[in-house]
Amino acid sequence: MNQVAMRDNTAEPEGVTLKYGNIPLQGEKRLNLIHGLPGFEHLSAFVLAELEDYAPFCALVSEDEPEISMLIINLQFLSISNNVRVPGREWDAVVANNKDAREIWAILKTDHQSGEFLANVKAPLIVNTEQGIAKQIILDSEDLVVDYPLSEGLL
Amino acid sequence: MRVTQSMMTRNMLINMNQNRENMNRLQEAMASGKEITKASDDPVRFSRAARYRSMIAQNEQYRRNINDGMAWSNNYETVMEEFRSLLEEAKALAIQGADNTQSLDTRQILGNRVDGILEAAVSVANGDHVGKAIFAGTMTDLAEPFSYDGTSVTYNGNSGSITRRIAESMNLNINVSGTDLEATGMFTALINLRDALNANDPVNTAVSIGEVDSAIDDVLTLNSRIGLNKNHLEMTETRLNIADSNIMAFLSRTEDADLAEIISKYNAEETAYQAALTTTSQVLNLNILDFLR
């Protein structure tokens, strides 16, 4: 069970280990998802944390409902990242004026039959890492899909 | 120490291999670590997963409504183009008829052609989509929302809206009523033009050119409204797809395979139970009939 007890962005709470399922999390960062997530519009406060021993995979965990969590991966680890162009107005929406503070992440799900990871590169999460503001955007490009197989594109 | 290209390449390959290895391990961990949850074991988690699954089912219904709305919109776009084409043809006849050199006979011929255009426009306005009149408001069973008696056009429908629920708390009006169509002034413009030509009146024929032009503009404006509707439908559908993808991402970590199996097993048992009830009922009826005989 996921436990998100902390409110301080930097200090880890004593005696509480963040987990994704049975996998411990580390290096957590707090995010404010403006407009929530489609399907979970009522949630905006999230934590982004690394899965211990499973780099580059991370977890996005709701602070208000810790049971709501998803696997995510930074697009820099996917070959398709070259095709992902985020419009300037979207970076403006998360106030990411500093280009060094911009990150793009994809939410992962598993294929029901094969268990293979599929990345949603059609609707990535853009993150302003300086201020912890994020937004899930929808890109127009028809080359981008919601179920991009990681087995094909993981660098 | 100088970092060579081969060292950089080797490090990159090592990282790539490590990433893939970690991905495989994680996939295995998720597959083997799925917590088997039945309603009786953890009703809260079971209930939460079931709730999000029902959202996916609800989104499917919204998508069906969106597809229906799109079909109506596509139909309207085709029809609006037909109206525009008919009006352009009428405008050309009006320009010809407004020429002072035209004779009475010529204008009457033109007037008859405009009458034909008017009949065609009424016929198009009485079109349907899967058996439902498209320009009748909510009176979609009407065979003729518009009737033309050779003199004037009468609208027999209402101004009602047909709506579809396309998302949570989001309804969209998907129809164009006959009232909206009348408001373009299309039929009035064609009738006035016909009458001016039949009366051999070049002055009013010239006035009709402006009226037909205005009707063309209003038809195009109506078409733009339909286009906006289509955009709205497409955007909503995309958002629903993203919502479903996010929900599946959340369910991927939970017991979705087990939940699907549980629901499937419940449905199978329910079907078998209902079948057993039916059989039992038939057996009982036979016995009663036998007794009565």
Image: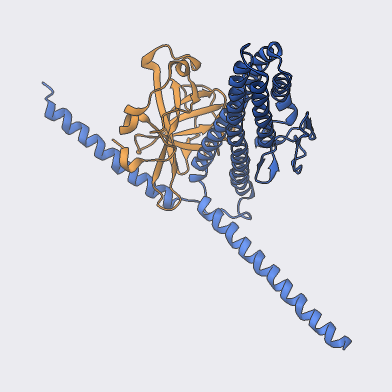
Q: Nearer the viewer, residue B271 or A65?
A: B271
Q: Is residue B152 above or below residue B215?
A: below
Q: State which quadrant residue B153 falls in.
A: top right
Any idea which chain is the blue one in this picture? B
Q: Is residue A99 above or below residue A153?
A: above
Q: Nearer the viewer, residue B20 or A27?
A: B20
Does any portion of residue B30 appear in the rendered image?
A: yes
Q: Nearer the viewer, residue A41 or A87?
A: A87
Which quarter shows the C terminus of chain B?
bottom right
Instruction: Judge left or right: residue B246 versus residue A100.
Output: right
User: How many numbered marks, from 0 up?
Assistant: 0
> Residue A46: horizontal and vertical position, in percent?
52, 28
Q: Is residue A95 above or below residue A47?
A: above
> Residue B49: horizontal and vertical position, in percent?
59, 46
Instruction: Judge left or right: residue A127 versus residue B262.
Output: left
Q: Nearer the viewer, residue B283 or A133?
A: B283
Tell me the shade of chain A: orange
Q: Residue at x 48, y 20 (%)?
A: A132
Q: Residue at x 50, y 51 (%)?
A: B35
Does any portion of residue A78 appear in the rendered image?
A: no
Q: State which quadrant residue B164 falls in.
A: top right
Q: State which quadrant residue B138 falls in.
A: top right
> Residue A1: horizontal and vertical position, in percent?
53, 42
Q: Residue at x 40, y 12 (%)?
A: A98
> Residue B165: horizontal and vertical position, in percent?
67, 37
Which quarter shows the N terminus of chain B?
top left
